[in-house]
Amino acid sequence: MGGAVATLYVRNVPPELYARLQHWAETSGRSVNAEVLALLEREAARRDERSDWFEGHHALRRKLGLTPEDAEFAVAAIRAHRDAGL
């Protein structure tokens, strides 16, 4: 990285999620801000490593006319089905 850094504000964080962020931050000895940055960095690296999968996912979503919310619902349903051993 280099150059100027950006400031990101996140609105409407559900209290339950913020409590989890606080817990993770305490556990790792970081501030909530540093914990969120670490999470974003890990997710960015994961997406970079799996860029082909993500591109395919987005292309399929566009082809089927799904919104991001539709796709998230579908993924959650598939995971629930998998986790239930069905």
Image (cartoon, rainbow, N blue to C red):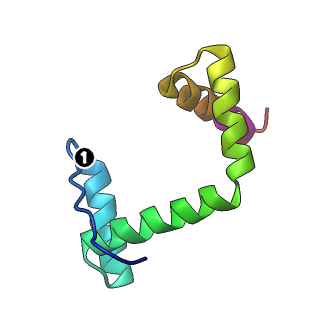
> Residue 65, image x and y in percent?
60, 14
> Residue 24, image x and y in percent?
37, 70
Per the image, label 1 sits on a secondary structure element best described as loop
Taking 37 as reference, is 75 left or right? right
Q: Quadrant of the N terminus?
A: bottom left
Res 84 seen here: no
Nearest to the observer: residue 1 or residue 14: 1
Taking 53 as reference, is 45 left or right? left
Looking at the image, the residue that sits furthest to the front is 3
Which residue position holds label 1?
A: 13
Q: Residue at x 35, y 71 (%)?
A: 35
Res 39 seen here: yes
What secondary structure predominates along the stretch shown in magenta?
Answer: helix
Q: Residues within 10 Å of mark 1 (few under 14, many from 20)?
A: few
Nearest to the observer: residue 60 or residue 15: 60
Q: Amino acid at mark 1?
A: Val
The relative height of residue 57 versus residue 38 in the rendered view (above or below) is: above
The relative height of residue 15 versus residue 45 in the rendered view (above or below) is: above
> Residue 43, image x and y in percent?
53, 60
Residue 82 sits in quarter:
top right
Q: Quadrant of the C terminus?
A: top right
Nearest to the observer: residue 22 or residue 39: 39
- The magenta segment is 78-82
Residue 79 in magenta stretch: yes
Looking at the image, the residue that sits furthest to the right is 86
Q: Residue at x 71, y 32 (%)?
A: 81
Residue 21 in magenta stretch: no
Q: Residue at x 26, y 63 (%)?
A: 6
Residue 12 sits in quarter:
top left
Q: Residue at x 20, y 44 (%)?
A: 11
The relative height of residue 73 versus residue 65 in the rendered view (above or below) is: below
